[in-house]
Amino acid sequence: MRHRIFACLIVCISLFSSCKKDEATTWESNWVAPVAHGRLTLSDLTADNGYTDNAGIYHLYFEKIISGFGTSDLTQIPDTNISQKFVVPLSGGPFQIPGNTAIITQNQNYSVETNGTGLRMVKVKSGQMIVHVKSYVNAYLHPTFTLYNVSEVYGNNTDIDFALTPGSAAAPTEGYYTVDMSNKYVVLSGTSGFDYNKLSTHLEIKTEQNTTADQNTIYGQDSVRFELIMSDLVIDYAKGYFGNDTYSFNETFNLAQSANMPTGLLALDQASFGFHVTHKMGFDGKLKIDNVMGLNTYMNTGVQLTGGNLYNPFFITRSIDNGGTASVSNYDINLNEGNSNITSFMGSLPYSVLFTGSLQLNPFGNVSDGNDFFYSDQLTEAKLVVDVPMRLAASDLTLRDTLNVEVNTDAVRVSSLTLDIQNAFPMEWKLNLTTLGGVVVAADLNVPNGNSIDALALATSSTLVIPISEAQWNTIKSEGKLILQVVSNTPSFPQLVNLYSSYFIDVRVKAGVVLNAEVE
């Protein structure tokens, strides 16, 4: 059609061009031009978080993973700075000390800060230890600092050597050494082997071997200061006693981000809720769910999920460390139409689900004798699963879609919008069309029932013509969007109907275009 109009336009321009007139000739031509198209389906409603069952009925399906239950800081080692001064065990002076003579020898158990956890061994994923030595001694010194049981090979040591020139109280000499802790084991059971959070070290300070006595003038009470700095340690594996503290969790399962949640009143059939725990951490626990609340921010309402043994505490049994892989124990809570209010809970159309509770570690005490364990990539998880078959009754069920408007020329004015609509849902709809800024273009237009038979979509076609003003059209052009809203009531509410994946509403928007032309 458009090709014929443009052909006629060319002919007319040629004819007018051959005529000699003093005044310009004006005329106008009308046609219908497509500007927008939208299709609402059940997969649009759920943002593809859905599936079709064996009967062809579409299901809303959502799941949320909760990992660690608030225990993410359980085995972390905060940044730590341990500083200690070592004094030469002499009185008076000066003393002339020959080379290769030990002046300080010290074994030390350093306390390592944790977040309340008793650790006996960790494997570090990343981070560093920095050893800083500062000498106030007027001698050439050779300090050797040993980190016992700190190595990439379990049980080996890390030895650190320094060579320090003579220092003084006013101008001490310094040395730094950085240990990359990536993939290193750190034993924290102290020299006894039974402590927690104790790092064993050995310090020996000798005069430098290739020096003479007159080069090493030492006074009693001269000192050397050592600092051990632990920085950005990330734990990959830990073993010890993790205590019996209680950790709280507070999670929001946001349905509106994963689904274009409708509004209105919805009666559902056979919705289900699953809470599935997979325990992978080496401690016993007592898990308690305090609240599962569905929140509809659009309606400012909330419905608490109740039923079954959802709010009863239950015990989870520690996993077993199988040489790098934790055994798994599973715990399940399943709610359905028969044992809970899950159907009315989901019928309230929650935009989000608030999930709160707590996990107590080791409710029976240190029954493992310090052999609790943790792998950073094998945390205890809970999966929340909501499954809602689209067998429903709807009252003022409202769906929305945003249509992109394409305008190819500004040399037009538009007097109307034509909506070609196909409805394959077994319910009639009221259609509203607004601009992005909320200006009403059309309201409460009737879309008749589809002729669908079970899963077979037999769409009913209808055409609606909407007069629009120049101001409305200019707004649509400038925003480039139209908001399509459809509102439906199922027949004989609250009688249930099945919704199938093949159902859709298709809306094509065309503009009644008037093109003004002027030819000299």
Image: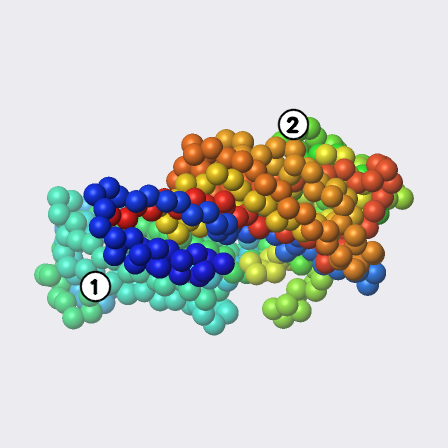
**Residue at 76% from the left image edge and 57% from the top image edge:** 458
Q: Give the residue furthest to the front.
A: 20
Residue occupied by mark 1? 163
Secondary element under disc 2, as helix, strand or loop, is loop
**Residue at 41% from the left image edge and 41% from the top image edge:** 413
Comparing 157 with 493, the one in front is: 493
Left or right placement of residue 513 versus residue 119 in this view: left
The x and y percentages for residue 238 are 56, 58
Is residue 200 placed above or below 486 in the rendered structure?
A: below
Could you classify mark 1 by the number of other residues whose Cα lies within 10 Å: few (under 14), some (14-19), or many (20 or more)? Answer: some
Q: Give the residue furthest to the left.
A: 214
Residue 493 appears in view: yes
Q: Earlier in the sequence, mark 1 or mark 2?
A: 1
* Disc 1 residue type (three-letter): Ala
Left or right placement of residue 312 versus residue 445 in this view: right
Give the label, 1 or 2, closer to the camera. Answer: 2
Residue 292 appears in view: no
Q: Give the residue furthest to the right.
A: 338
Residue occupied by mark 2? 300
Secondary element under disc 1, as helix, strand or loop, is loop
The x and y percentages for residue 323 are 63, 70
Tell me how many marks there are. 2
